[in-house]
Structure formats: structure tokens, C-alpha cells
Image (spheres, helix red, strand yellow):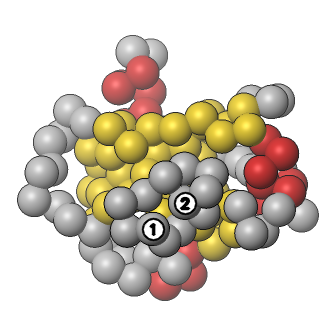
Amino acid sequence: MPNQNPEFADIYGVAPHVVPDAHDAPRRNVVVHPRSDVVTVLGRTSQRGGFNEQHCMLSEVDLSCRLDLPGMFDVRHKHSIFRAHFTRPSDCEFYGSLGTDEAGQLREFYDRVSGF
């Protein structure tokens, strides 16, 4: 089941009681580093005004993952979430997985910002 086993490039709606959000609504996050006890995610925003190639990766509309507006994944919205939250849809609801091309771009981006 996807909620119990988050994988790289999976998109989740993370509830504000897990990761606080200014909009007090689930923020779309992408998994960038699933570990055994903690999962690292990058938050997505639809406000592209502060785009900085060093810290952000543009993300296009992808209705299969409930990404209904153009946006960007931003390392300023990087969070670590205990894996147990992914077993509860009320905490982390699975929205889908990025397509192959965007997942590849995410891998390159995250490796670069992580220093790999």
C-alpha cells in the first residue's frame, strides 16, 4: 500500500498537524529521501515568484497527482516526517507518483542541492 511505503517521487498531502502550513491545509509534498524511520520531503508551492534555480525545481500541472496548478518544489520547505504518519491517510494522504521525466529531474535536482 503506497501510504505505508513512501518511495522517491511519491506525492502526499501532508496535514498541517504533521507539518504546519500557513494556509492551514494539507500541503503537497514530494518524497526525496525515504529512510527506515524518517521520510524527507520537499514542500510544493504554486507561487513561483520567488523561484531560485539553486533552491527550487519547477513543477508543472499533473492532475494524476492532484497538482492542479503550476508550482515548484522548494528546499526551503524541506521536512522530515516520521514514517508512522504515512500509515494514516489523515496525516499523509497518497496523491500519486511523479512521471518518469519529472522524477528524473527531481533526482538530479535533489542530488545537486544535497551535494552528491
- Residue 18: horizontal and vertical position, in percent? 62, 51
Q: Residue at x 60, y 63 (%)?
A: 15
Q: Name the element at disc 1.
A: loop
**Which quadrant would the C terminus be assigned to in this image?**
top left
User: 3 or 108, which lies in front?
Assistant: 3
Residue at mark 1 = 24
Q: Where, quadrant-wise, is the N terminus in this rendering? A: bottom right
Residue 65 % position (x, y) = 55, 75
Q: Are marks 1 and 2 in contact (CB under 8 Å)?
A: yes
Q: Report the Cα–Cα distance between label 1 and label 2.
A: 6 Å
- Type of residue at label 2? Pro
Mark number displayed over residue 16? 2
Q: Is residue 115 in view from this perspective? A: yes
Percent coordinates x, y for residue 25 in the rendering: 48, 71
Q: Residue at x 39, y 83 (%)?
A: 68
Residue drawn at point x = 55 percent, y = 60 percent: 16
- Residue 26 locus on image (x, y percent): 53, 68
Q: Is residue 65 left or right of residue 110?
A: right
